[in-house]
Amino acid sequence: MRKKLGIAALLAATAALVAPGVASAAELDEVAGSLAERTSELNMVWVGVACVLVFLMQCGFMFLEIGFSRQKNVGTGVAKILINFAIATIAWWAVGYGIAEGGGNDFFGDSGFFFHFDQVVAGEAVTGESAMLMLYGMAFCAVSLAIVWGTTLERIKFGAYVIYAAVFGAIIYPLVAHAVWGGGLLGDIGGKPVMDFAGSSVVHLTGAVGALAALLLLGPRIGKYDASGKPRAIPGHSMPLVGLGVIILWVGWFGFNGGSTFEATGNFFGEVMLNTQLAAAAGVIGASIAIYLKSQTLDVGMAGNGAIAGLVGITAPSGFVEYWAAPIIGIIAGFLVVFAVLAIDKLVDDPVGALSAHGLAGIWGTLAVGIFASPRLIAEGAAPGIWYGIFDGNVTFGGTLGQLGVQGLAVAFTFVVVFAISIVTFAIIKGTIGLRVPPEEEDAGLDISSHGMYGYPEVFIPQPEYSTGLPSTMVGGVAPAASPSQMTATETE
Amino acid sequence: MRKKLGIAALLAATAALVAPGVASAAELDEVAGSLAERTSELNMVWVGVACVLVFLMQCGFMFLEIGFSRQKNVGTGVAKILINFAIATIAWWAVGYGIAEGGGNDFFGDSGFFFHFDQVVAGEAVTGESAMLMLYGMAFCAVSLAIVWGTTLERIKFGAYVIYAAVFGAIIYPLVAHAVWGGGLLGDIGGKPVMDFAGSSVVHLTGAVGALAALLLLGPRIGKYDASGKPRAIPGHSMPLVGLGVIILWVGWFGFNGGSTFEATGNFFGEVMLNTQLAAAAGVIGASIAIYLKSQTLDVGMAGNGAIAGLVGITAPSGFVEYWAAPIIGIIAGFLVVFAVLAIDKLVDDPVGALSAHGLAGIWGTLAVGIFASPRLIAEGAAPGIWYGIFDGNVTFGGTLGQLGVQGLAVAFTFVVVFAISIVTFAIIKGTIGLRVPPEEEDAGLDISSHGMYGYPEVFIPQPEYSTGLPSTMVGGVAPAASPSQMTATETE
Amino acid sequence: MRKKLGIAALLAATAALVAPGVASAAELDEVAGSLAERTSELNMVWVGVACVLVFLMQCGFMFLEIGFSRQKNVGTGVAKILINFAIATIAWWAVGYGIAEGGGNDFFGDSGFFFHFDQVVAGEAVTGESAMLMLYGMAFCAVSLAIVWGTTLERIKFGAYVIYAAVFGAIIYPLVAHAVWGGGLLGDIGGKPVMDFAGSSVVHLTGAVGALAALLLLGPRIGKYDASGKPRAIPGHSMPLVGLGVIILWVGWFGFNGGSTFEATGNFFGEVMLNTQLAAAAGVIGASIAIYLKSQTLDVGMAGNGAIAGLVGITAPSGFVEYWAAPIIGIIAGFLVVFAVLAIDKLVDDPVGALSAHGLAGIWGTLAVGIFASPRLIAEGAAPGIWYGIFDGNVTFGGTLGQLGVQGLAVAFTFVVVFAISIVTFAIIKGTIGLRVPPEEEDAGLDISSHGMYGYPEVFIPQPEYSTGLPSTMVGGVAPAASPSQMTATETE
């Protein structure tokens, strides 16, 4: 830093050698070079911040799953996220990054494995910028994986995670990411790229399709459907923990969408973040209205799902649409998620609503780009020269549908690739070590059966010494009613 | 980015055309222009980070409210924050931002509605910098609204939120923000502006006054006061969740105060953040000493309120006072909040202590600027040439009091405007849909009565299958005592 | 900001005065000077972000402690972190920063007390950069202190915290920080500095040694060991809260390690963050394999400890090793922590595993630098010209061991200094006000005995009105089975 701070003095001295009062070209080059370095660093500081926010989303998924579980299945949610985060990290580092980002052909990349291990052993440095962008990609992969798992709660066998997580982090997610973002098949469809700004399809639909494959082979929880096949409510044990999960995801999404600019240039991330917030808010409102109309009460989980659906919906369009479009996209996503959750609940046991909030909202978001994309943002943005959303008067109706068609292709591609590999992987797991715990373990809960101890031991193990009311030693002393706790003034003056 | 990285090469080539070895003015202009762009981006990266931190504060308010509620009223806290965050967002986007920041007259702004919808339809871009600053303002509005609601816990009717939230986000908060920060009435009082760096008055006092209006019309919870009118303790159900709320708010405050520089220039945000931390710490210490002296025990909620009071107290002065003043401001706020909570508890049922921690501490913070403002920071800062704090020897006593008077005016203005509109709004709500749930719903809890399900269902709904001790299938198998869980070695070797 | 944005125009005008088309040296100087300022600001924005993340780690420690406590001791964990954070802040501001960073001699610094109070009263400004770096140092001190306290849960006397926290923040941590990072004894050992990038020794081992001193004088919780001295499991009450703590710590660590670059230069923080993530992931995997092999079940707490051990292990090497080394360091730390926790549990009651996860993993991380340090990173990094890790072929075996020896010296120094002062401090506390609460208070729990109210009041205080199943007013109304909550469709259409 000493060097940089002295740059002005150094340059002033050099300038005098050229001509008094005149700046030398060499000096100017040096300043321009420094500025280019600072620009890269500024961009990576922004991506670094965004990356941390996306990592924080693991905490959001953890608590969404735990909150929607019963008390006997809360510790397993912690173990699941820790293990999956770990496996996704190592799989992405070793293989996935190379497949997603390592050049190659239309289908997969073929370099950069173990994060450019070949370069490292050759004594060449890999730039800090590469490392930062690779880590950011890893965070996205881990989000996509977390979506798969949440909804398998309360009955999946723990060991099944490890295998699928490795396949997902090394192959499934990277194939989709390569196709759309890594120079693969969907980057150029007759001159038109798929436009998925931060991954409504690449990340969210991918996760939801993995979840669908898992749920189909896994089946519902015991007691979810009655004898006639009608679904029954199995309420999650803690709405506060669901709320914690939702808000952390919401906040993390500013890194998810905002960081997908990969740079600070033109403060474009500000526009993306504002779109994100408007759609999330509209998603809450849409879902709240929908559930209230349907049931005359405001379901807490549905309000949360509305936020997530709004966020998933705006993920693809956040960098391509004007501000007025964002709340429209969000409110539609919010409506959609309520009706989808209620409809899907009759068919599949999806306790966190992943198929709806990440799957259908992901499809909606991907298609919404084809409807609302703004010429201004396309001209300035990542995809000049392509067809525009149907609300732009300057292009023909046929031309417009073209981009919508391209977006539809991305949905179809994502669905087919992810579903095919996932269903095969899960089928192999099911046929070997098994996907589901035995009924008596499901009944006892995964905490005690898979992890050796309840997540809330004092709820399940009798605690005779102190759980039967006030401790006798205290009753005559600092009795609660006489305490100043939580702001009472009765006895404290 | 490619363009920028090649700037040095490009410029070097151009330079040769002017004179060998001499830098061309055009090139230098280009470098200077790029630097100006990078400067704006650096500033907005900082504001973007700060904005995310302020959004995270919604999570803090959610858990402060939930932690101080009883188990039957925990889900409603989640729904409340989600809905309020959503409504504040849409209201600020549509109307509030225009009133607060849209130029206009002394009383309200008159442009920028629906975030410059007029410009957007005219095909003009709104800059990313504007979007970022608008989002940051929205985050502040949402904080102020969250303060209003927290303390109405356990008895307010859910529908009442929606209406007041819309009025608050569209009108109430924007009027105050316009008066102080948006070029309105309090920006120039005989040449002296009100100095409220990050909003002790604009945000915190505004929220607390809204809360006061609500509480006066709402009345206390059933059982809060005994027959003789003496307050009784209704302890919050979870101090860990209160602690989560407090720490998240504390951390978020670095974005709240630190980001209110709106730029990174001169690393001034570092000074602001240090002041913030010193005051928060002193607030904890002040409140802990006060409650210990009063009751010979260290109340957990009071320690948390001390932190918040210290933070609210330093919010206005954080950019105007020297480091030595910050802990003094904080410790006084900490003392203040304890005695205020105890005193107010006899009159009004304010379970989270909002009137004290945000109201009185907000007033204290606003006035503290008039006492401690440093000439150095005023000369360098946003308000050159105004009168200084009374500890500056260079100005006359009369001059000094002048700024204190101006600060007092801000308090009075905020109180009158917010209270008048709020009490009318709440009175209309009370007279139409009603402010308060019926007693039997309050008794049953808002979760089941307003949201259709308990927030903690297993606490209230009998769970015969597995909550009666160890599951029989497990007792002979992986009995807890034989588990390695939580680090015991008994049976594991 | 207006000033900066107009810089290009201003310079263009000035240039015309020198020679048409030629850039003036004065202008170039001004641009270069501005760039130097922006560079400092960019660096401090990064450190500011990192600082907030490290502050957030207080929340992680809070929940690690609370989650591993029983329900009767949960509020005290909140109070403890708030008070300790506050005391560490004030102690560091008043004294600790001066000792750590205030120049001076080999043993302690001697200036900068009360954050350069002497300068402030002389009317001199302290730069924002200094303030930011001082705050960042404070965050590290608070982390180290939090490590000491967590593991004393469920039996320590609250008042004992305050005294030790003040000594620790003012003297103990600053002495170690000065020795390694502040120009003290370990900065130059025969030309070789100790290399502890972000504090495996300085922060984590220091905290763990303080914890060891406390535990030795404090003794185990009642019931931890049976009559024959065999340890018994006392499971923590909430694995979800443990999980919350672990993930927050994990995320915060990106600020802890990533910010220890103190600058954005060359995007080096990206490399550090990637190393951090790889080691954390490998730590989870290592610990999970180890505990599974040992007990055929996947303990949730152990998976979490694996993450923390991986993070502590990579803390010292994160800026000195290549990517391939990070997962190796992490997986070894993960294995280590499991066996250490099981072994230590027989001797000392360390409920959160601090001695293992922060102590042994801290030693391992410090030594790992001596094994894996890369010539590339040493040449480019903070420590040119020193001996390298043993895997570098260019240096002799003897030379290599030299750095390992230097690292060992840091471990020994940290252990001796921290243990000596801590054991004396605790002995004095024990001999005066006492270290431990009386058995009847331990039995009743610290919440009710030290803080006047349970942290979970409704668990302990009978709640006849509404905790005995469904409220009768509701059974005929919005019965839970008929609710749409948590996504059921039964009755909602």
Image: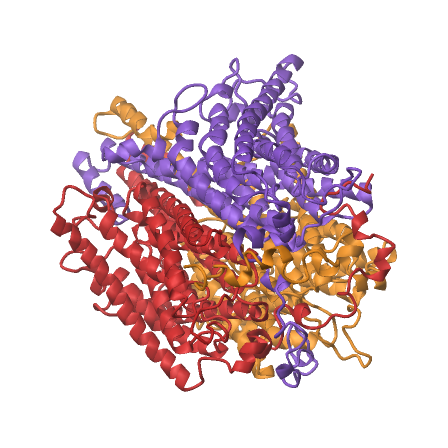
Chain colours: A red, B purple, C orange
| Left or right: A17 in relation to B288 | left
Residue A152: which quarter of the image?
A: bottom left
Measured as percent of width and height from the top left, residue C32 is found at 37, 36
Given residues C323 and B272, the one toward you in this image is: B272
Given residues C81 and A200, the one toward you in this image is: A200
Note whether C126 is above or below A316 in the view shown.
above
Looking at the image, can residue B59 be seen? Answer: yes
Residue placed at 46% from the left, 58% from the top? A57
Q: How many marks are shown on the rendered structure?
A: 0
Measured as percent of width and height from the top left, residue A50 is found at 42, 52
| Left or right: B290 in relation to B474 | right
Residue placed at 75% from the left, 56% from the top? C447
Measured as percent of width and height from the top left, residue A318 is found at 32, 49
Note whether B60 is above or below B328 in the view shown.
below
Residue C220: which quarter of the image?
A: bottom right
Residue placed at 72% from the left, 51% from the top? C165
Measured as percent of width and height from the top left, residue A94 is found at 38, 72
Which residue is the extreme one toward the front? C476
Image quadrant in which the N terminus of chain C is located = top left
Note whether A297 is above or below B106 in the view shown.
below
Residue placed at 41% from the left, 19% from the top? B105
Note whether C85 is above or below C149 in the view shown.
above
Looking at the image, can residue C51 be seen? Answer: no
Image quadrant in which the C terminus of chain C is located = bottom left
